[in-house]
Amino acid sequence: MKKALLAGFFILISHICSAPNIDFRLEIFKLRSFSESVNKKHHNSELSRFISDLGYRESGNNWLSVNQIGCFGEWQFDESTLKYLGYRTITLKKFRADPEIFPRELQLKALRTLIRVNRMHLLNYEHFIGNSINGVIITKSGMIAASHLGGAGSLQKFLKSNGSINRKDVLGTSILDYLKKFRYYDLD
């Protein structure tokens, strides 16, 4: 994506520099607009890839999935998380009886809300980005995924303890596992 941005930049620069131009400011505005458009498309593409890969890791991208500990949906939501996000009427019992109460589109909306909430909880921890803990470079995408796995509080304890508090879910997946697995997405 960065190569496409650079190519577009050089094409526009060559256009600006090759012929007399009456309104240079207009050309600069077009260049900035083009750059912003490319960046937005790149960000949306990376977020979509992250969401899809997280869903695959959580449930094999099966929006009807229910795991052995009672988390459900494509992104394996716990009832308490859904209640925290405002989805008070969606329970495991109701989902098992009628999965249409929590269709994939609504699950995606809940996930996007959870990502925004976790990002807010992690604002004071962004200074860890770029650091290495137990051989894993901390990234924003890894932090968001690890927060999805164990909650923002578990990630915060991991970061503050320099990795010595590395909580695992009941299936044995740790905060460090998700920091490592999901570190390569550009979510800035």
Image (tube, rainbow, N blue to C red):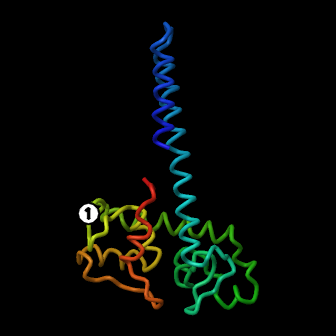
* Residue plotted at (56% across, 45% down): 41
* 140 on left or right of 33: left
* Residue plotted at (62% across, 66% down): 109
Query: Above or below — where is 26 with respect to 69?
Result: above
Mark 1, other Cα within 10 Å: few <14 / some 14–19 / many ≥20: few
The residue identified by callout 1 is 131
Q: Nearer the viewer, residue 32 or 133?
A: 133
- Which element carries disc 1, helix, strand or loop? loop
Q: Picture coordinates of residue 24 (x, y %)?
A: 46, 15
Query: Picture quarter containing residue 73?
Result: bottom right
Q: Nearer the viewer, residue 100 or 176?
A: 176
Tell me the amino acid under the disc marked 1. Asn
Q: Picture coordinates of residue 117 (x, y %)?
A: 46, 67
Total labels: the figure holds 1
Q: Picture coordinates of residue 58 (x, y %)?
A: 55, 77
Q: Nearer the viewer, residue 3 or 41?
A: 3
Query: Picture quarter containing residue 144?
Result: bottom left
* 50 on left or right of 167: right
Query: Above or below — where is 178 with respect to 168?
Result: above
* Residue plotted at (58% across, 72% down): 56
Q: Picture coordinates of residue 47 (x, y %)?
A: 53, 58
